[in-house]
Image (spheres, grey):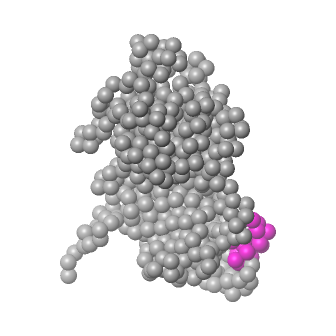
Amino acid sequence: MAVVNKNIVDKYTLNMNNIIIEVRVVSRDDKPVPDYIVSITNISDTTKIILEKIRQDFISRANLNDIEASEDTRNENIREKFRREIGELVTKYFPGCNEKTRNMLINYISEENLGLGKIEILLRDPDLEEIVINNSKEPVWVYHKKFGWLTTNIRIFSEARIRHFATIIGRDVGKEITTLNPLMDAHLKSGDRVNATLMPISNFGNTITIRKFAEDPWTISRFIRFGTISVDAAALIWLAIQNELSILIAGGTGAGKTSMLNVISNFFPPNQRIISIEDTRELTLPKTLHWVPLETRLPNPEGKGGVCMLDLLVNTLRMRPDRIMVGEIRRQREAQVLLEAMHTGHSVYATIHANNASEVVTRLTNPPIDIPKPMISSLSLVIVQNRNRRTNKRRTLQVAEILPNGDPSILLQLNIHEDVLEKVNESTTMIDRLELYTGLSRAEIELDLRQKIRILKWLVKERIENVNEIGLVLSKYYMGHLKLE
């Protein structure tokens, strides 16, 4: 019998309501992807057996309809009632435990019976980006920030339970998933985005895909420290944003487009009104900013009450925005309204699915978007994000300016072999615009770029990475009060 070599490549702990959970990422010779293994460390196996007895005792007493109602987070009274009943059972089986231990055991049983069960553990791990239930036969999969796709030691053992999870998620935000309506997009109260499908649409079983909302969002200093973007490129983008030039961020699925959109918002001045439009809110801007987030809404089952991206775009132009951020451009009318906004003096920042700068222009000028090429010249920069699926590294692939004829000119290009963003061409159009509209000479623009590079390097050196801390630093910069230590 062959010996299977195992190697623990990472290990850390999570605290979920005083339940201590150990996470181990283990690679094995006999598996194509590592395992993500969770285990509760501060509850013994003997205690777990007793807790399972309490859980069964609780289920036999409780009304099934009440349990289902309690999983709707709006029904706080029923949830509190169940916690009291579980607490009475814990006191009966563990009469000598102190209050802290008692609460921890109540939390453990509550997590097992109410809400999403062990999926709640995965939702608490900040290193996870995606949580995927494919069916009841496979383990739950997760996408880890460091290690990519991993299989877990968590399973949902029935299709009915997966469907039940999807139902309670939808019910919490006024959506439903049924045999007649087997697809659902929703989100948790935490902001995590959820997609669910039911059999037979998904052939192998019911599915749930959760894209986690970043509680600690990416910031420019973290991007630089992790090598996602160079200091020179970041300074150039900062220069463009400070001077109200519009930017489009492109890339494939999972390349980090929304993360980059969030990162460049670090450079917004605090004395301007920013309005963001998304299908599901993913952006988190510094608290120092004057920010109004808007979100689309799907119609109800009767087809009423829907609010689409175009509705919000048109409305946003009546809200006196200085900056407009859009989650993703998909359709012609959305692109037209955005480009018209640029022509009328608004600064616009948006994302689009495209793999390079030339493809961005091709997508914008062909169906279904089909914008006349000369109209694109109101766009100043295109930033292209890329994820190398072999190394799992996300990088800025290109920074390009848009010429007056609508063609892209690559300014910075990633040297993939050296993992370095290299200068390809000098800027002409962007620098000409800055000279025309700001009165700055080329020498003054170069001096400004050097100052920005110095500030960015200081942010990285001092490990100032929190979005609100960076917001404070940038506010001081714009007010002329920033003094580097």
Name of the residue lying farthest toward the right: 77
Rendered residue at 49%/71% (across/down)? 133
Which quadrant, please, contains the N terminus?
bottom left
Q: Quadrant of residue 60?
A: bottom right
The reply, left or right, for residue 285 in relation to residue 71 is: left
Determine the residue positioned at 31% across, 28% down: 425
Q: Which secondary structure class fits the magenta region best?
A: helix
Q: Position of residue 196 (x, y in %)?
A: 55, 70
Residue 285 position, x and y percent, is: 59, 40
Location of residue 278 with respect to 79 vertically, above or below? above
How many labels sit on residues?
0
Nearer-the-camera pick, 318 or 281: 318
Q: Is residue 78 magenta?
A: yes
Which residue occupies the foreground of this view, 377 or 254? 377
Q: Residue furthest bottom?
A: 60
Establish if 239 lies above or below 119.
Answer: above
Task: Establish if 329 lies above or below 469.
Answer: below
Residue at the spot 59% in from the left edge and 68% down from the top edge: 184
Q: Which residues are magenta?
A: 67-86
Q: Is residue 5 left or right of residue 279?
A: left
Q: Residue furthest left?
A: 2
Q: Nearer the viewer, residue 124 or 172?
A: 172
Camera-side residue: 465 or 279?
Answer: 279
**Residue 201 forms part of the magenta stretch:** no
- Can residue 130 be seen in this snapshot? yes
Q: Is residue 325 above or below residue 53?
A: above
Looking at the image, can residue 385 be seen? no
